[in-house]
Amino acid sequence: MSETSITPAPLLDSPPEFVIPGAPLGRGSRVLLCAWTLFLIAGFGLATRLEPDPRGYGTHQSLGLPPCSFQILFGLKCPSCGSTTSFAHFVRGQWISSIRSNPSAFVLALFCAAMAPWSAYSAWIGRTWRLEEPAKAIVWMLSGIVTLALVQWLVRIALE
């Protein structure tokens, strides 16, 4: 009978570390992410204080801002017309009205709503949570929103 030798597994000096995926953040980046989180929260807070204009645009005028210059000059709504109204509907959970006011602003509101907790958590853990290249992800997302804004604007012009 042959004897089989068993080699014991080497002992680990310390347990393996659990590494959270994402790029490491320095102190300055963490402070900026905290400031960005507060800015996003403040923006949503402001939107809760605004009464959406029934026309679907013009809510920004309740902040003392002038009417849309593009609309005055060219007689057409600009690509961002209805954005403030869209955010005001969004924070009230009136998502269909938000989309009707400005579809790209609705998508931007969704993006901002997701970005606020992501930014806060990333600042807290010191890494960009689940994103190795956050700048690239943001560029892609904002490019999509801009493209949607231009497409919805062209459709709006064609239908007017």
Image (cartoon, rainbow, N blue to C red):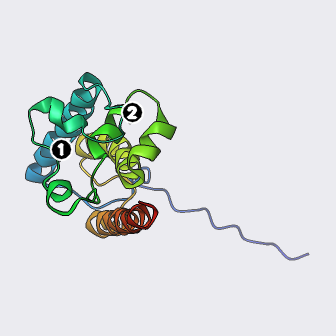
Classify 10 Å Cα crowding around label 2: few (below 14), some (14-19), many (20 and above): many
Task: Please state which amino acid type lies under the numbered disc 2.
Answer: His
x, y percentage for residue 128?
A: 30, 55
Element at badge 1?
helix
The residue located at (39%, 44%) in the rendering is: 101
User: Looking at the image, which is closer to me, 35 or 17?
Assistant: 35
131 horizontally vs 123: left or right = right
Asked which quadrant contains residue 6, the reply is bottom right
41 horizontally vs 154: left or right = left
Query: What is the total number of numbered labels drawn onto the structure image?
Result: 2
For label 2, the residue is 89
Instruction: Give the quarter of the figure containing the C terminus.
Output: bottom left
x, y percentage for residue 121?
A: 31, 41
- Give the alpha-carbon distance from disc 2 to disc 1, as whole Å: 22 Å
User: Looking at the image, which is closer to me, 33 or 69?
Assistant: 69
User: Looking at the image, which is closer to me, 66 or 46?
Assistant: 66
Element at badge 2?
helix
Classify 10 Å Cα crowding around label 1: few (below 14), some (14-19), many (20 and above): some
x, y percentage for residue 5?
A: 72, 71
The residue located at (19%, 37%) in the rendering is: 60
x, y percentage for residue 124?
A: 25, 40
**Is 157 rendered above or below residue 128?**
below
For label 1, the residue is 36
Task: Please state which amino acid type lies under the numbered disc 1.
Answer: Trp
The residue located at (45%, 45%) in the rendering is: 100
81 horizontally vs 18: left or right = left
Q: Residue furthest right?
A: 1
Judge whether residue 11 can be spotted in this image. Answer: yes
Q: Residue furthest bottom?
A: 2
User: Looking at the image, which is closer to me, 8 or 21?
Assistant: 21
